Amino acid sequence: MNAHLSLTTWLPLVGAMLVLLMPNKNLKLARGVAIGVALATLALSIAIVARFDPTTYKFQLTEFVPWLPSAGVNYRLGVDGISLWLVPLTALLTIVALGFSSYVEQRAKLFLAMVLLLETAMIGTFVSLDLILFYTFFELSLVPMYFLVALWGGEGRRRAAAKFFIYTFAGSIFMLVGMVTLAFLHQRATGTWSFSIVDIQSAVSNGSLWAGAVQAQTLIFWSFAIAFLVKAPGFPFHTWIPDTYAESPVAGPILSSAMVKMGSYGLLRFCLPLFPEVIRAQAPILMALAVISILYGAILAAVQPDMRRMLAYSTVSHMGFVLLGIFSLDHLGLVGGSFQQISHGLTASALFLLIGFLLQRRGTSEFRAFGGLKAQMPIFATLFLISMLASVGLPGLSGFVGEFLTMLGAYKSGYSGLIGFGTMYVALACGGVVLAAVYLLYMYQQVFYGPITSSINARLKDLKPWESGLAGVLVAAMLWGGLSPSTFTRPMEASLEATRQMALNEGTSKPTWAESPMEAVVLKR
């Protein structure tokens, strides 16, 4: 049996256990083992991309092991164009977070183990093809993130950790109810219990799952959507993120830049293809929430005096573009939203990493504590500028590609009449782009230009070579995504178009994941 995905998923957990078993005096070795395991996981994730066939929308590298077959629960893994890039993104950001762990002195082994455990949880979420397995990994991610915030965060860490856990766990309960209901409907339609994503989607495609239960679709749709909007985070379920980002150690926001993609991924994986009778009616509501997220997050980011809180609200705004693209139900919008997931993961992580280096040197991330750093820290200033411009959406960098395709797809949906008020949503979303340029450029001006405001700032040292290397890898990925976006978009397109056709019941033949893996989707342009 092919075990590539299992090895990629579980290797970080094995590394976490090895790290915990090492003697406390061998901390340097423990860090080396953790980073070595993370590098091996990244290599395995790159091998997944290399083995991936971009011409089909089917799940690839699939694995199946019976778990609780009488209850329809089994160990199923697979990857398609929707989940493909999220695996190496998670692996890369884990390495970045572990690289920063050299600044962690208290409970360092436990810190390393929590980072690796979170990596297993996130990768497992992206490759699970069974609802219960997906839910297990989805919830498992709460545990290491809770401890990362509660044990290594700032003064308000316990409150922030509790708020994060309660919000995200409560939202997931709705999803569990929806999952059980889907399995029950599958049993009613076919006579067998199954929590398989493939089996349930097949029953949706042939019309048997929702026969006689069309009215239940809206409730079940929102049971999933709420859970994923909390994680994404989308308005009005975003309130956990400012405190979590502000109080957590630097590794927390870096990894959270991948963790929030679990929400947008869930919307793509479940909310679009499984509820075809209600998706057109619900999409305008979710697009409206996306636009509110864009504007609300940008406005609050613009008034923050602290860089970490500003980036927390910026995340709400930028993830709003992801939601806008997903629920445009247009091919280009879906590609743009999916690409924006990757771009935001890179830009937000790079900015948090660089702010973390500044925090280690200065002990604060408030604007007023700085000034004149461009002359004092030129390498730092250059990397920060490129990351910031990518976040703004400057052409030639990854952020522009995601935002442009997202708004183009949303405009097409509105212009064609597929989504009501779609063109108005795009016009409003443009305001978020302008506001992002305002608050990010203002931050850069305050921190990097003007006179040096403190003797402490005059003694600040520029980035060390390993620090420049960590940030440089992320910056290189932003440039790659901006100059050669087809590298990332081409493997996505078949799966995203099939998902769009599933959602809208379009195509010469309804695509379904249960068909032959060698059968290519009929792309309807």
Image (cartoon, rainbow, N blue to C red):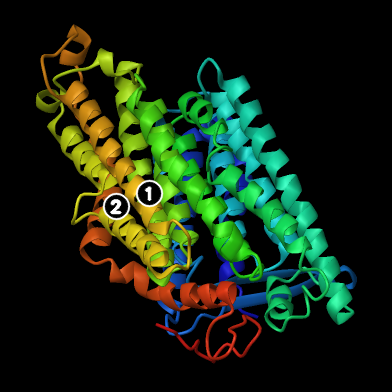
Badge 2 density bin: few <14, some 14–19, many ≥20, Cα 10 Å:
many
Residue 231 place in picture, x, y as percent: 58, 45
In the rendered view, does 148 fall on the left or right side of 54? Answer: right
| Vertical relation: 39 (above or below) 165 | below
Q: Nearer the viewer, residue 293 or 468?
A: 293
Marks 2/1 in contact by CB < 8 Å: the verdict is yes
In the rendered view, does 432 fall on the left or right side of 312? Answer: left
Q: Residue placed at 50% from the left, 19% from the top?
A: 154
Q: Residue placed at 28% from the left, 19% from the top?
A: 367
Residue 91 place in picture, x, y as percent: 46, 54
Q: Nearer the viewer, residue 235 or 117?
A: 235
> SS of the residue at dot 1?
helix
Residue type marked 2:
Gly
Q: Residue placed at 51% from the left, 65% from the top?
A: 83
Mark number displayed over residue 344:
1
N-terminal of the pair, mark 2 or mark 1, is 1
Instruction: Residue 269: name its quadrant.
Output: bottom right
Residue occupied by mark 2? 399
In the rendered view, does 398 fall on the left or right side of 110? Answer: left
Residue 193 place in picture, x, y as percent: 86, 72
Badge 1 density bin: few <14, some 14–19, many ≥20, Cα 10 Å:
many
Residue 423 place in picture, x, y as percent: 37, 57
| Vertical relation: 392 (above or below) 462 | below
- Give how far apart the Cα atoms at labels 2 and 1 are: 7 Å
Residue type marked 1:
His
